[in-house]
Image (cartoon, rainbow, N blue to C red):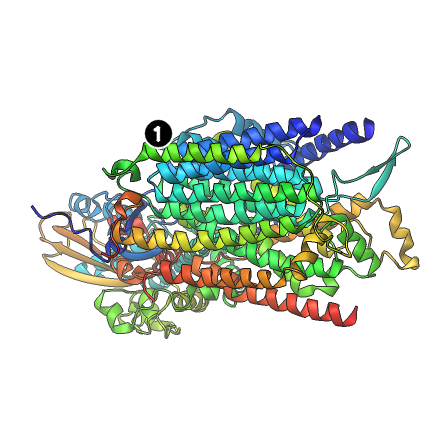
């Protein structure tokens, strides 16, 4: 019961703030709603027992990536509103229609009836207990190569961002 | 009783809101934020199933997705800044030239 | 029922109130200590030796007119002080003020909760606190606050990287992210981590000063350059919230440094039998004493040092602190793997 | 009609942020307004706007008699009023070819140097405060208070002294005053060391001041800089040595000069001037000759027709008075001041260009201006 109440409250807020992100007139408001949205997503993770991920969500997403967005929004202080000019070939209605179709599709798939718990994956014999320890153990054993690739990706992204954003090299 | 279906429906709704944002908004920064919403929708799914299967692999993948999101944000915002510097706009409808 | 709801609620109420009172008296302490450093007396009028000054300040700030600039983004302008105050307070949830006491025949732990990602929780909540300053500067729609908030965002993100990297080496020593476990690890390893990790200690102190916008890193509010920085346009209670948040964050930093490096609530030489008598002093008293030392140090530094310049601050963060933090982490890891 | 050139590659660079620093700003030392054009935090250009404190002292002086003008000179450099008095009185004395008694010249020297220390105390306090070291401010004011007490004992005023008269001084020094001055010198010696402990070798202070606002000697001369700001660039120009007035020709002192011409050197020069001033005060106080304190001045001061320029070394630099007398009236025909703060201030745009916002306040402090003197 408590779990259900928690889920509905959190899910409700996630969706409300997501809608606000998309509909906000000013980009700064959008950013603020995005942060709040991410905090609720983190709460959802915590309720799912993924506390390490919840903290990472706050630390990296809410505290890091979105600050970057805010930074750019502040740098890009515009003389005319960005929405002033619309491409005459733009098909906004089609966009809504496509999105609705996709929602329908995903919804149908999702609610097709929950079959049965998939057979547990080859149980990862983690010699540790606890959420943080388990995630860490997996990251540094089975998923070491993807982990390294992810760090390479971040490094490349960092260099790329510097090259792009720097005025002159 | 909250089943993975509930989480999947939440995820689908969040995903769709993100897609609507990408399709409808013209401010490229907001479009980027919509993409972040989409990535979060995926993460919710992964974590929900990770919880259902009692297996932390889903969370590991969610971490990878966060890493990718960070990389995407850095490069994407770099491109936005570089573009803004040249054309003084962040309207995606005006970004229709391959070079200037 | 009592254990799950009443006691945690009571603890939350006590900690919040103690924090707010502590913060207001921090302001008085700072004024007094700086006054003594500058051969002045400090506040003397309200109450004996000015001890009721915080009350007078609070009354003044509350009845002051709360001005919102006409061209400000009203919504964000109102939200920003709240955004900076809330994280400063909810961090206290995981700070262990002491071990256990028995009250009315019941064992009560002197911390609200002990989650096993406690340290990460502190770091992440602190990272959300950045928004208060950035949004305040943006929402004011004024040039000095905007400059200040750009400075603040760059400064806080940079130093967050350095501090978090440094904290990892402490976590490597303790083998846990839980604040309580970190204190216990210091008991078990017979040494305060300030002696095992002196480099990390200094880095966290410097980074903590920068994270809380304290001198010599108080650039976002540099009064002499930016006329008060991000809170230039604020007045009354909303200004007070920023003020309180800064001091609440100072207490957080002192508490975290105490927990991580000075053995938290442990007395000196916790494992030496000859010093067993130190246990007669209650654990929370040790904690408060140690935290107070750091608070005093912060004030002392403010009275002594000039302010860094923006580019020098960035250089210090990225070219000095982060490389040292990484080197410290690598060395800690190697030592830990080879020797333990 | 041509469409606007949006394809201009450097459009973002031209989008500068214009900040009005002042006239109400905590670190512009009064009502100075600096219009800063910023690129990020970097200063691209700075326009100095003055005149907020203009009271028309020069014009007013043309309608006052010669003695009344002394009172107006107090209001120019109000943190070093006695020096302004001396400058004016000596100019008129030059116009009158009046002999000033040696005793008066000695006391004038003492007052001038005390005033220099007081002014430098204010400078070091505000300069350090601008850079963020707040304690030095109160320490320096503590010592300035001692000097103000000495002045109060001598002439009854603490800020605008009106302490000189044409031909000498209005009052004999009070008994025991010279002892107190010597006592103050003793105290001040250790206090200067205290300031230096807080600043001179402080890493942050060094980083904030070294290499900031570097200006070479010839360029500083070309910009008309004077006083410690000029000596910091290595130009040994000091009116006290070059064209001695009062009793400086009988005093033994050095003129400290800097080498790099940056904020740190200007700081060091002024710190050394503290010590040299104390040296002069000691010599002068111990050697005050006997005799009258005021010379033989005609009842009605009416200088012969002619013009004269006389400069003295005020704490800020070369303070010059140019006075024209028509020989008929009891007021000057033309009264003109060459204020050191004004001349130093015009170097500010050159100094701050390319530096950061934080350096602007450091540099305003480093050239040590008083707006009362700039605007007159």
Say whether residue D25 is visible.
Answer: no
Q: Is residue A122 left or right of residue D316?
A: right
Please give the chain letter of the residue carrying mark 1. C
Say whether residue C308 is visible.
Answer: yes
A93, above or below D18, in the image: above
Quadrant of the frame with the N terminus of chain C: top right
Quick one: C62 or A32, which is closer to the camera?
A32
Q: Position of residue D159 (x, y in %)?
A: 39, 47
Task: Tell me the residue at 59%/51% (across/down).
Answer: B61
Badge 1 density bin: few <14, some 14–19, many ≥20, Cα 10 Å: few
- Report which quarter residue A24 is drawn in: top left
Task: Tell me the residue at 39%/74% (across/down).
Answer: D254
Task: Tell me the residue at 79%/40% (across/down).
Answer: C110
From the image, tell me which residue sits under label 1: C70
- Report which quarter residue D362 is drawn in: bottom left
Task: Tell me the residue at 36%/48% (across/down).
Answer: A75
Most distant residue in the left direction: D1
Describe the element under mark 1 as helix, strand or loop.
loop
Q: Is residue C158 left or right of residue D267?
A: right
D275, above or below D46, in the image: below
- Report which quarter residue A160 is drawn in: bottom left
Q: Position of residue D231 (x, y in %)?
A: 33, 70
Quadrant of the frame with the C terminus of chain C: bottom right
D360, above or below C252, in the image: below
Q: How many marks?
A: 1
Quick one: D170 or C137, which is closer to the camera?
C137
Q: Position of residue A27 (x, y in %)?
A: 39, 39
């Amino acid at each position: 019961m408590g779990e259900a109440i928690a889920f509905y409250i959190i899910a409700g807020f996630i969706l409300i703030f997501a809608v606000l992100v998309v509909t906000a007139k000013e980009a700064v408001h959008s950013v603020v709603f995005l942060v709040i949205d991410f905090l609720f997503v983190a709460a959802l993770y915590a309720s799912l027992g993924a506390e390490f991920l919840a903290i990472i969500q706050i630390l990296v997403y809410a505290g890091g990536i979105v600050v970057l967005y805010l930074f750019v929004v502040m740098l890009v202080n515009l003389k005319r509103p960005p929405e002033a000019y619309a491409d005459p070939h733009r098909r906004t209605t089609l966009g809504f229609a496509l999105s609705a179709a996709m929602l329908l599709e995903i919804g149908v798939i999702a609610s097709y009836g929950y079959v049965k718990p998939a057979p547990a994956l080859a149980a990862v014999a983690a010699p540790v207990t606890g959420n943080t320890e388990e995630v860490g153990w997996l990251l540094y054993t089975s998923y070491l190569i993807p982990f390294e690739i992810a760090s390479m990706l971040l490094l490349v992204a960092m260099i790329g961002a510097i090259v792009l954003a720097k005025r002159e090299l | 009783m909250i089943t993975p279906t509930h989480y999947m429906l939440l995820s689908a709704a969040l995903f769709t809101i993100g897609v609507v944002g990408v399709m409808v908004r013209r401010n490229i920064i907001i479009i980027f934020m919509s993409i972040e919403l989409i990535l979060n929708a995926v993460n919710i799914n992964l974590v929900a199933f990770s919880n259902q299967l009692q297996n932390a692999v889903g969370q590991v993948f969610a971490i990878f997705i966060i890493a990718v999101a960070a990389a995407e944000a850095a490069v994407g915002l770099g491109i936005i800044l570089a573009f803004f510097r040249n054309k003084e706009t962040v309207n995606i409808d005006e970004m229709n030239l391959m070079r200037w | 029922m009592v254990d799950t709801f009443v006691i945690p609620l009571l603890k939350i109420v006590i900690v919040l109130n103690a924090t707010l009172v502590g913060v207001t008296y921090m302001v008085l302490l700072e004024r007094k200590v700086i006054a003594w450093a500058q051969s002045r007396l400090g506040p003397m009028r309200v109450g004996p030796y000015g001890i009721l000054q915080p009350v007078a300040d609070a009354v003044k700030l509350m009845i002051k007119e709360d001005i919102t600039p006409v061209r400000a983004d009203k919504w964000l302008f109102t939200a920003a002080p709240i955004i900076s105050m809330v994280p400063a307070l909810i961090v206290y949830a995981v700070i262990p003020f002491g071990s256990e006491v028995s009250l009315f025949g019941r064992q009560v732990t002197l911390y609200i909760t002990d989650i096993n990602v406690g340290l990460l929780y502190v770091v992440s909540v602190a990272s959300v606190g950045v928004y208060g300053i950035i949004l305040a500067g943006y929402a004011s729609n004024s040039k000095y606050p905007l400059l200040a908030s750009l400075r603040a965002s760059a400064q806080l993100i940079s130093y967050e990287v350095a501090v978090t990297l440094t904290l990892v080496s402490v976590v490597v020593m303790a083998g846990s992210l839980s604040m309580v476990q970190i204190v216990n690890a210091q008991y078990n390893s017979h040494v305060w981590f300030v002696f095992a990790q002196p480099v990390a200690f200094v880095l966290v102190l410097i980074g903590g000063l920068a994270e809380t916008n304290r001198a010599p890193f108080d650039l976002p509010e540099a009064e002499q350059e930016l006329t008060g920085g991000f809170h230039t346009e604020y007045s009354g209670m909303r200004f007070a919230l920023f003020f309180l948040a800064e001091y609440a964050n100072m207490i957080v930093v002192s508490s975290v440094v105490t927990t991580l490096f000075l053995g938290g609530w442990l007395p000196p030489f916790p494992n030496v039998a000859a010093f067993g008598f130190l246990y007669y002093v209650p654990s929370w008293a040790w904690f408060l004493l140690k935290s107070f030392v750091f608070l005093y140090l912060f004030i002392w530094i403010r009275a002594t040092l000039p302010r860094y310049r923006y580019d020098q601050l960035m250089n210090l963060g990225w070219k000095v602190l982060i490389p040292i933090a990484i080197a410290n982490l690598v060395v800690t890891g190697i030592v830990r793997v080879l020797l333990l | 009609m041509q469409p606007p050139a949006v394809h201009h590659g450097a459009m973002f660079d031209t989008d500068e942020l214009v900040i009005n620093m002042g006239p109400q700003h905590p670190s512009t030392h009064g009502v100075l307004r600096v219009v800063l054009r910023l690129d990020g935090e970097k200063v691209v250009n700075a326009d100095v706007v003055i005149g907020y404190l203009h009271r028309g002292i020069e014009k007013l002086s043309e309608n006052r008699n010669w003695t009344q003008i002394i009172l107006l000179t107090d209001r120019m450099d109000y943190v070093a009023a006695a020096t302004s008095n001396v400058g004016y009185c000596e100019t008129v004395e030059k116009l009158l070819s009046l002999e000033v008694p040696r005793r008066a010249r000695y006391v004038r020297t003492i007052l001038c140097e005390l005033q220099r220390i007081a002014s430098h105390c204010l400078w070091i306090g505000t300069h350090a405060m601008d850079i963020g070291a707040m304690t030095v401010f109160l320490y320096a004011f503590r010592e300035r208070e001692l000097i103000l007490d000495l002045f109060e004992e001598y002439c009854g005023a603490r800020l605008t002294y009106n302490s000189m008269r044409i031909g000498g001084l209005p009052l004999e020094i009070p008994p025991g005053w010279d002892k107190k001055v010597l006592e103050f010198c003793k105290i001040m010696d250790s206090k200067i060391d205290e300031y230096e402990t807080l600043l001179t070798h402080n890493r942050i202070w060094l980083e904030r001041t070294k290499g900031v606002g570097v200006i070479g000697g010839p360029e500083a001369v070309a910009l008309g800089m004077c006083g410690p700001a000029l000596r910091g660039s290595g130009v040994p120009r000091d009116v006290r040595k070059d064209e001695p007035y009062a009793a400086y020709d009988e005093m033994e002192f050095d003129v400290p000069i800097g080498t790099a011409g940056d904020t740190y050197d200007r700081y060091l020069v002024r710190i050394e001037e503290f010590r040299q001033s104390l040296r002069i005060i000691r010599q002068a106080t111990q050697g005050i000759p006997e005799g009258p304190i005021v010379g033989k001045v005609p009842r009605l001061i009416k200088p012969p027709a002619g013009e004269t320029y006389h400069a003295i070394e005020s704490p800020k630099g070369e303070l010059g008075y140019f006075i024209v007398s028509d020989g008929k009236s009891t007021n000057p025909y033309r009264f003109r001041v060459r204020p050191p703060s004004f001349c130093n201030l015009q170097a500010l745009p050159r100094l701050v260009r390319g530096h950061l916002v934080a350096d602007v306040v450091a540099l305003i402090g480093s050239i040590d201006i008083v707006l009362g003197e700039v605007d007159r």
